[in-house]
């Protein structure tokens, strides 16, 4: 007899979780000076490139509006679009599979690979398969998955985790990459230097054998077009093109939010995406395929349409625009928090500002430490400014903080220091006369500051402030009192 | 024009001189300034910390204080608090299911201006020395606060006005558009990351050789000033309202 646990999630959601509170993870990562140096260098150079190519387009703002509108429309009619896509993809000889969560998607992919008799697959870089932890799952089922994107290969060979959605090995410099290759790449030239072209050639020689031998490839997709049943992958290295065309079987795992209404829509996204992600006018390889073509390319073409929390995010009226994300990574490249902590601090497959909203939206705010993610921002707004589809990330961060506080309110019996501070603040700042009353005590603060007119140590949670900042001695009199004394007594 | 001053809680309690400077500038231009006494705070600290029900009395108080007909525009010496009034108040009202409050919030937001927004866009000030008599014979640098720059789209209004102050020298701040790391309770909840951001800001300010860093938000300046003070660095912080109010006769000292 099968047991059903009511109220429990039906399956696992994969790699969407922050395992420890963000401040704790950030504290550790901040101490990694080599990583911070690598990341500062990399993010600053991508920022400059992006600004340059974005500045070339006089209609950039109009393009952002178009991207945002197309995505909003698509999300508003998601069910219809998906069914339309299914119909057209199937009519062209593709097979559509639906997965509610990571566990289901992993199971479907495993069965599809098994059916081919192959125990090896090559992979195109894909966020959806990182999200569901597909490689680890396949490994546990006796199937070896080989990443073919250079940076993913570095991460995989180094037994590491990606720290960025576009540049997974952004936290490594070329000397570290050389060391990983020397240690982990079979048959590598022992005299390999850290010259980038030498490193690329080593990877190319290693991967070429895999491409030619592979019977099965697994990819993600940057978009699906409902009206034609077409899938698209946008990439830089050509490894994707090899995987998408050489093997007999092609399995694509794609989040359901990636569907666009029509063929014409890619015109907008092909302008927004490369400029926002790699800072290029155009990416080197764009592959589009519609079902299977007789005598050309893979003959067994599958797509796994993945929910894994997307319908949950769609139901959040203040948060749903997070699903408009096209995974360009512009937000993390400009984020001052990400720049200093790196991607591993966020725990989830999705780091940076978009990860800080997407992960809790997909899983629910109360799961694991995902409630700590929306606070990983000074709300400076650099992410919103850079986002090619205008996701108002700061607003959603604040909204999710509200969700977090409300969720914890129900759990905590005793109020925290922050709860008490906010309750007190609500009274003090809720009336002009209340704040006026408190301001009468400003001279006491002056007394506490002492001779050098600085407050250097505060108790409790406020100690976070005084760990690196003084507070000036308050004035003798508030503006409010000055106004009463000077202006009103006239 | 009859102008309602929204002093903001931090300026009211910690930096009263900045509010006085704002009054001085506007009176110098011949406007009447009023101070609605019921005002307290925009509620941003509560909202940005996720305490939405607790923010409601604060937001309602602000809307009640400024939802009157007896002034033309409201002004605050802060980009952040004005951005909160304009964008966050309607959000909170919607979140908590108060459509009538949302409409009133929008109406208040529509006639609330950040100081340089009012000076440049409404009052036509383009030369502080000529039109305001501003004089400040010091070398400063300038940090554009995030909310003014991004949420309000102030662009170069603040810096351009400062450049026209008599006697002033402005040294450009490297990586000026990078956040100082304040972010309200971010500075205590994520104190380590915030401190790392502040550290870079402090170093950049010191590299300019300026004797002060100016800006349009007292809260960011308190954060930056706190970091400068802790590291024993020489530069002070000074709100741009205090610089604009400074004249040949009554020169503000650092």
Image (tube, rainbow, N blue to C red):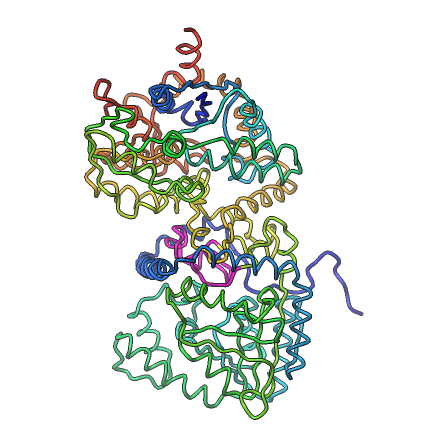
Left or right: residue A382 compared with residue B168: right
Query: Outermost residue toward the front?
Result: B124
Residue B61's place in the image compared with A483, above or below, is below
Q: Which residue is drawn at 28% across and 82% down?
A: A190
Quarter of the rendering containing residue B209: top left
Left or right: residue A288 compared with residue B100: left
Residue A302's place in the image compared with A59, above or below, is below
**Which of B132/B205 is in front?**
B132
**Which of A280/A165 is in front?**
A280
Quarter of the rendering containing residue A276: bottom left
Residue B90 painted magenta: no
Query: Outermost residue toward the top?
Result: A490
Quarter of the rendering containing residue B130: top left
Quarter of the picture holding the C terminus of chain B: top left
**Which of A203/A56 is in front?**
A56
What span is in magenta? A325-353
Quarter of the picture holding the N terminus of chain B: top left
State the image coordinates of residue B252 (x, y, percent, origin top left): 25, 23
Q: How many labels does the image show?
A: 0
State the image coordinates of residue A288 (x, y, percent, origin top left): 52, 78
State the image coordinates of residue A481 (x, y, percent, origin top left): 43, 14
Q: Residue at x 25, y 41 (%)?
A: B205
Residue A348 painted magenta: yes
Left or right: residue A130 compared with residue A177: right
Left or right: residue A297 compared with residue B27: right
Q: Which residue is drawn at 43% across and 54% down?
A: A386
**Which of A55/A342 is in front?**
A55
């Amino acid at each position: 007899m099968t047991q059903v646990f009511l109220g429990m999630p039906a399956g696992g959601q994969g790699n969407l979780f922050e395992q420890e509170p963000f401040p704790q993870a950030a504290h550790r990562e901040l101490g990694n000076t080599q990583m911070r140096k690598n990341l500062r260098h990399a993010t600053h150079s991508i920022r400059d490139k992006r600004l340059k190519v974005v500045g070339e387009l006089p209609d950039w703002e109009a393009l952002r509006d178009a991207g945002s509108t197309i995505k909003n429309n698509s999300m508003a009619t998601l069910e219809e679009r998906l069914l339309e896509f299914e119909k057209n993809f199937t009519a062209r000889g593709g097979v559509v599979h639906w997965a509610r969560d990571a566990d289901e998607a992993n199971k479907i992919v495993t069965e599809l690979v098994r059916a081919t008799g192959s125990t090896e697959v090559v992979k195109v870089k894909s966020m959806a398969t990182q999200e569901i932890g597909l490689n680890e799952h396949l490994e546990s089922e006796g199937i070896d998955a080989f990443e073919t994107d250079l940076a993913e290969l570095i991460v995989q060979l180094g037994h590491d985790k990606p720290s960025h959605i576009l540049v997974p090995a952004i936290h490594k410099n070329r000397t570290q990459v050389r060391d990983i290759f020397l240690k982990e790449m079979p048959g590598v030239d022992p005299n390999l230097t850290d010259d980038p072209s030498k490193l690329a050639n080593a990877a190319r020689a290693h991967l070429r054998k895999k491409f030619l031998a592979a019977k099965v490839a697994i990819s993600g997709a940057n978009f699906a077009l409902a009206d034609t049943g077409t899938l698209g992958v946008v990439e830089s290295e050509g490894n994707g093109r090899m995987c998408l065309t050489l093997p007999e079987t092609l399995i694509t795992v794609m989040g359901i939010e990636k569907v666009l209404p029509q063929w014409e829509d890619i015109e907008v996204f092909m302008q927004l995406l490369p400029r926002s992600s790699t800072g290029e006018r155009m990416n080197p390889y764009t592959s589009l395929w519609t079902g299977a073509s007789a005598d050309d390319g893979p003959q067994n073409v599958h797509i796994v349409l993945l929910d894994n929390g997307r319908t949950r995010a769609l139901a959040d009226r203040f948060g749903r625009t997070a699903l408009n994300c096209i995974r360009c990574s512009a937000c993390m490249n400009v984020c001052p928090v990400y720049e200093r902590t790196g991607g591993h601090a966020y725990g989830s497959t999705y780091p940076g500002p978009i990860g800080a909203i997407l992960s809790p939206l997909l899983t629910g705010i109360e799961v694991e430490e995902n409630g700590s993610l929306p606070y990983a921002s000074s709300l400076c707004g650099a992410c919103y400014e850079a986002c090619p589809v205008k996701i108002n990330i700061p607003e959603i961060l604040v909204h999710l903080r509200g969700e977090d506080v409300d969720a914890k309110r129900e759990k905590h019996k005793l109020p925290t220091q922050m709860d008490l501070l906010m309750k007190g603040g609500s009274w003090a700042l809720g009336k002009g006369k209340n704040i006026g009353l408190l301001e009468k005590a400003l001279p006491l603060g002056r007394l506490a500051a002492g001779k050098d007119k600085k407050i250097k140590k505060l108790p409790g949670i406020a100690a976070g402030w005084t760990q690196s900042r003084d507070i000036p001695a308050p004035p003798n009199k508030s503006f409010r009192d000055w106004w009463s004394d000077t202006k009103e007594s006239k | 024009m009859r102008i309602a001053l929204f002093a903001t809680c931090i300026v009211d309690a910690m930096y009263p001189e900045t509010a006085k400077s704002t009054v001085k500038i506007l009176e110098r231009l011949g406007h009447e300034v009023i101070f609605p006494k019921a005002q307290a705070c925009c509620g941003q600290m509560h909202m940005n910390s996720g305490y939405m029900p607790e923010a409601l009395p604060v937001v309602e108080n602000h809307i009640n204080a400024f939802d009157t007909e007896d002034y033309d525009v409201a002004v605050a010496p802060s980009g952040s608090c004005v951005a909160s009034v304009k964008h966050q108040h309607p959000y909170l009202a919607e979140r908590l299911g108060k459509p009538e409050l949302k409409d009133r919030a929008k109406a208040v937001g529509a006639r609330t201006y950040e100081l340089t927004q009012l000076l440049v866009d409404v009052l036509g000030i383009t030369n502080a020395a000529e039109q305001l008599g501003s004089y400040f014979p010091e070398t400063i640098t300038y940090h554009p606060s995030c909310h003014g720059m991004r949420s309000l789209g102030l662009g170069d209004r603040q810096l351009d006005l400062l450049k026209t102050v008599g006697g002033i020298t402005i040294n450009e701040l490297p990586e000026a558009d990078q956040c100082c790391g304040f972010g309200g309770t971010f500075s205590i909840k994520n104190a380590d990351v915030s401190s790392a951001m502040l550290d870079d800001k402090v170093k950049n300010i010191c590299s300019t050789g300026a004797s002060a860093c100016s800006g349009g938000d007292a809260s960011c300046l308190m954060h930056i000033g706190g970091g400068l003070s802790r590291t024993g660095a020489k530069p002070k912080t000074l709100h741009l309202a205090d610089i604009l109010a400074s004249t040949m006769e009554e020169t503000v000292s650092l």
